[in-house]
Image (tube, rainbow, N blue to C red):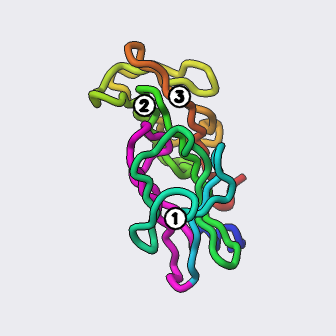
Amino acid sequence: MDQTALQWLLFRLTVSPNRSQLFEDESVSLSCEEDDSSAGWTLRRNTTTDTRADCGADWGEQPAGSSCKINYIFTWDSGVYWCESREGSTSSIINITVSGGSVILQSPVLPVMEGHDVTLHCQTKSPPSKLPADFYKDGSLIRTEPTGHMTIHHVTKSDEGLYKCNISSHGESPPSWISVTVKEGEV
């Protein structure tokens, strides 16, 4: 097993709610999960206002040793988040986009394994509803879904790209990059 795969097993960053886009004023919790609880970790982020900023010191609050909470998230909290050990090992990086608009695209936070299904949800801020939505990949319309949900079956590397959605009466979501992980032993 290579060093990168080993680091991913030791450290894992989880986000609740489990999505890469959030509405402004929502709350979000981030947790570093590790196999060796004695190793210690720091949750860091890079945003337009912060570089390698630590949770608790520069942003967010730590209600418990293993988590970090942002009670009211704002657009300037958009950026990349990761866990880092004292030894310098890092978890996977999670990209979080905070929208000041009225539509977000709910998509996986972590890469999707090749061959699995992935469902994208086009969500309005209020009221939550299942409205018809147009889904785009890399700027081109894929299809319109009457309930605002689109499932991509048996994803391949060709499904990787920049996705967004649009609900005509509410607006367009920010774009989100969806990564596809190739199964071990394949190229």
What is the number of the mark on residue 150?
2
> Which picture quadrant has residue 58?
bottom right
Residue found at x 32% / y 25% = 147
Which residue position holds label 3? 164
29 is within the stretch colored magenta: yes
- Decide if residue 134 is in sight here: no
In front of the other: label 1 or label 3? 1
**Residue range highlighted in magenta:** 9-38
Q: Earlier in the sequence, mark 2 or mark 1?
A: 1
- Foreground pick, 30 / 56: 56
- The spot of residue 134 in percent (x, y) is 46, 20
Q: Position of residue 129 (x, y in %)?
A: 28, 27
Left or right: 126 as drawn, with respect to 112: left
Give the CA separation, mark 2 to mark 1. Answer: 37 Å
- The amino acid at mark 3 is Lys
Q: Residue at x 49, y 22 (%)?
A: 172
Which three-letter amino acid code belongs to the residue tagged 1?
Gly
Which comes sooner in the sequence, label 1 or label 3? Answer: 1
Q: Residues within 10 Å of mark 2 (few under 14, many from 20)?
A: some
Mark 1, residue position: 56
Report how many numbered discs are placed on residues in the image.
3
Q: Residue furthest top?
A: 169
* x then y, percent, for residue 184: 64, 61
- Can see residue 32? yes
How far is the residue under mark 2 from the one under mark 3? Answer: 11 Å
Other residues around mark 3 within 10 Å, as few (<14) / some (14–19) / many (≥20): many
Q: Nearer the viewer, mark 2 or mark 1?
A: 1
Q: Secondary structure at mark 3?
A: strand
